[in-house]
Amino acid sequence: MTLVAELSALVPGATVLPEGERAAPYERDESGLGRYPPQAVVLARSVDDVVAVLRYSREKRLPVVPRGAGTGKSGGALAERGGIVLSLEKMDRIVEVSRADMVCVVQPGVVLETLQKAVEEQRLFYPPDPNSQAMCSIGGNLAHNAGGPRAVKYGVTSNYVLALEAVLPDGTVVRTGHRSWKGVAGYDLTHLLVGSEGTLAVITEATLKLIPLPRRVETLLAVFPDEDAAAGAVQAIFDAGLLPRACELFDGPTMRAVGPRAPFKFPDGVGGALLIEHDGHGDGVTEELARSGELCTSQGALEVLAAQDEAQRRKLWETRRMVSVALTDIRPFKISEDVAVPRGQLIEMIRAVRRIGEKHGFPTASYGHAGDGNLHVNLLFRGADERARGEAAIDEVIETAIRLGGTITGEHGVGLAKRRFLRKEQGEAVVALQKRLKRAFDPDDLLNPGKIFP
Ligand code: 2HG
Ligand code: ZN
């Protein structure tokens, strides 16, 4: 029997796609790392399907690559060594939203926006959003411990995960954590699985913590002569004791790239911008936003524009959400990095990126989650040949982030894209310890093999 026939017999309820046209979307993701065709794709519909596929993978010694919505930026869902792509997209049920316990229980295929709307109907809030809520799924968010603009105030995905159901590589179903908000028994396996990029187990259900939905959200955009002034304002805002729920930076090249397609038109002659948002439950929100605006002005802002209604707010955020795609439009061979540095080093990081770009002769664009020092650094290339030359420049960006006390990836994960840098950040002993953990879960190295580790 062929692989596809065997899998179809094994998981009759699931959809099994052979290599070829229908499986083509599963060969790639949003990392720009190319196509990696799997030998088969299984669209699981139940935990039992996942168990069966993992047992089969062991028996046949075939790699299995778990996959969410395919919106990942680091190649975590690519079938680099072939094998079976195990898609969780059809396991997309919101099992429960409980106001009494302030939790929800979800399957991994739930699209983030669907979950956010469902909990908001009950005046509850699930804050993490990696800026792709309309497309990304909870499973991918869990695998990569997604962050996004609101992480500066509300933290990342792992801060909201209370419990998981997951299938180990040998097919054992485990339940880690607890539905209560608190609980400290034993090793924190829940948070070991979150962010493990599908290398230790396949998550089949998650219990997530919810918080009260803020009643008020207010947003402004401040424009500056250059990005250094914008970064200076970030520092001033936090120094003043304010904690915005988002504090996003655009440098000049980013604003120029997004300009033509953006619903919000930046004024002429500006070279940096901050998108700042405060939230809460009363009048204090307006006061805090005004204070942030004043601090921007005192740091050299040319204009501070407060969104007057929900439509204006949405325009600003749509403009921000478009940046990644807009940069790909102007330079399809961009390399986008995802470094994070301590907030106090943000200006130094931005300057270093400019210097590195100039030294190697490539334009750069930096933008992103300035409030928590997580900068999306892009090197912009016209062609694939330039991209190869750009690797040296990327090494320097990464080394700078590490030297400044930061990390090679603030939110996108290591996947394939950053594994060659892991040792640089963490050192041999920590990498070796993580590899021992991987072996304890997956002695045959069949679950998402080759990811994370150099
Ligand atoms: C964002 O913040 C996302 O817009 C995507 O993390 C960043 O594509 C990127 O590099
Ligand atoms: Zn981001």
Image (tube, rainbow, N blue to C red):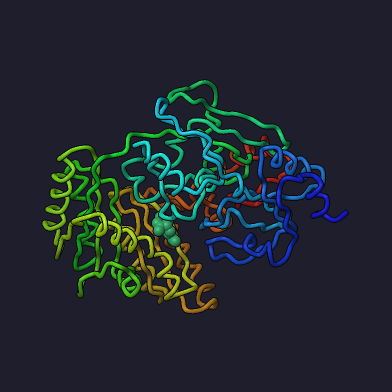
Outermost residue toward the top in this view: 185
Q: Which residue is drawn at 62% across and 44% down?
A: 199
Ligand 2: quadrant of the figure: bottom left
Taking depth in this image into account, of 418 and 71 the one nearest to the observer is: 71
Q: Residue 375 in the image: state x and y as whole percent.
A: 37, 57
In the figure, 346 relative to 167: above or below?
below
Q: Residue at x 42, y 64 (%)?
A: 324
Instruction: For the N terminus, give its image quadrant.
Output: bottom right
Q: Residue 452 in the image: state x and y as whole percent.
A: 58, 50
In the figure, 438 relative to 248: above or below?
above
Q: Residue 134 in the image: state x and y as whole percent.
A: 45, 55
Taking depth in this image into account, of 424 and 208 the one nearest to the observer is: 208
Taking depth in this image into account, of 58 and 49 the one nearest to the observer is: 49
Q: Residue 232 in the image: state x and y as whole percent.
A: 21, 56
Taking depth in this image into account, of 213 and 353 the one nearest to the observer is: 213
Q: Which residue is drawn at 38% across and 65% down?
A: 323
Apparent side of residue 416 relative to residue 442 in the rendered image (left or right): left
